[in-house]
Structures are given as C-alpha cells and as structure tokens.
Image (cartoon, rainbow, N blue to C red):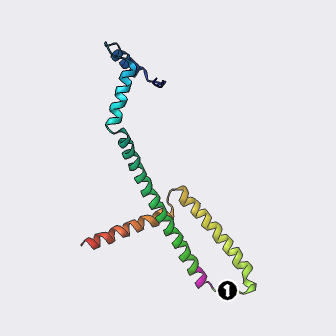
Amino acid sequence: MKPRHHLYLDDALTEELDRLARKPGSSKSGIVADALHAYLARGAGKEADAILKARLDRFGGTVARIERNQEVLLETLALFVRWQLTVTAPLPESEQAAARAAGEARFQSFIEQLSRRLAAGRGVGRELAKRLEDDAGAGLAEAAR
C-alpha cells in the first residue's frame, strides 16, 4: 500500500493538474509522482545545496568583515588606552577633584558627539574600516606594479 499525501496547490496549478488528469490513462497521483521523480532526478537536492552554499559563502564573508572590523576597533582602543596611561602624569591629591570634574565634562561631551555621529550614520568604526580597505587596496595596487 502506498502512503497517502495531502497537498495544497494554487488554483492555476490545480486547473492544470485536472486538465492533464482528464486524459485517458492518466491520474493526478501518477502525474504528481512523475513530476516529482523528474524533479528529483535532475538534481533538485544539488540545486538547493548550491543556493545554500552561495548564501553561506556570503554570510561567511560578512562575518569575516565583522570580525576584522571588531579586531581593528579593539586594537585601536587598546593602543589609545596604553598611550593615554603612558603620557598622563599622576595628579597631586589636591588637583584630583578638579580633574575628575573636567574628565566628567569631557566624557559627557564625548558621549554627545558619539551619539550624533552614530545617529547620522557616520561611525568612526566605519571610517576606520573604509580607510583600512583603501590602504589595503592601494598596497595591492603598488605590489602589482
């Protein structure tokens, strides 16, 4: 005994299937089975694999760019922190309160500027990544000469 399947087809496809099944010696089940056999025989699985592979390749490229940009940003931050800690002299106790207040004001200004840039779509990370791509492209062009 063959298993029973319930399929939902749109109206146009249903009309076409009904028209084909009216021919002598034809049945809807036979037509659908033949069509499915033909579809699978011509490599339907390979078609799906090719489509998925292309999408996964694009995702892989995107993830690689994100990882590279994140690494650049992390290294930039680390270099800045190291530089800042190296060049900033310790303050005497009497000046620390004023320095904290000035630091808080500067930090607030930094946050406001960062918010404006991100809202405008002009992130520093994007600029840095673009410059790196431009520099890499220029380096490849020079190497080709």
Q: Is residue 87 magenta?
A: yes
Q: Is residue 97 above or below residue 37?
A: below
Residue in the foreground of this view, choosing between 48 and 73: 48
In the rendered image, which residue does mark 1 sit on? 90
Q: Secondary structure at mark 1?
A: loop
Q: Is residue 66 above or below residue 75?
A: above
- Point out residue 42 in the picture as x, y percentages from the top left corner: 31, 37
**Which residue is located at x 38 percent, y 45 percent?**
51
Q: Is residue 87 left or right of residue 42?
A: right
**Which residue is located at x 28 percent, y 73 percent?**
143
Q: Residues within 10 Å of mark 1 (few under 14, many from 20)?
A: few
**Quadrant of the drawing holding the C terminus:** bottom left
Residue in the foreground of this view, choosing between 116 and 13: 13
Q: Residue furthest left?
A: 145
- Point out residue 95 in the picture as x, y percentages from the top left corner: 72, 83
In terms of secondary structure, what is the magenta stretch mainly?
helix
- Point out residue 122 in the picture as x, y percentages from the top left corner: 49, 60
Q: Is residue 13 left or right of residue 116?
A: left
- Point out residue 26 in the picture as x, y percentages from the top left corner: 34, 16
Q: Is residue 27 magenta?
A: no
Q: Is residue 9 above or below residue 117?
A: above
Task: Give the residues drawn in magenta, as a range.
Answer: 84-88
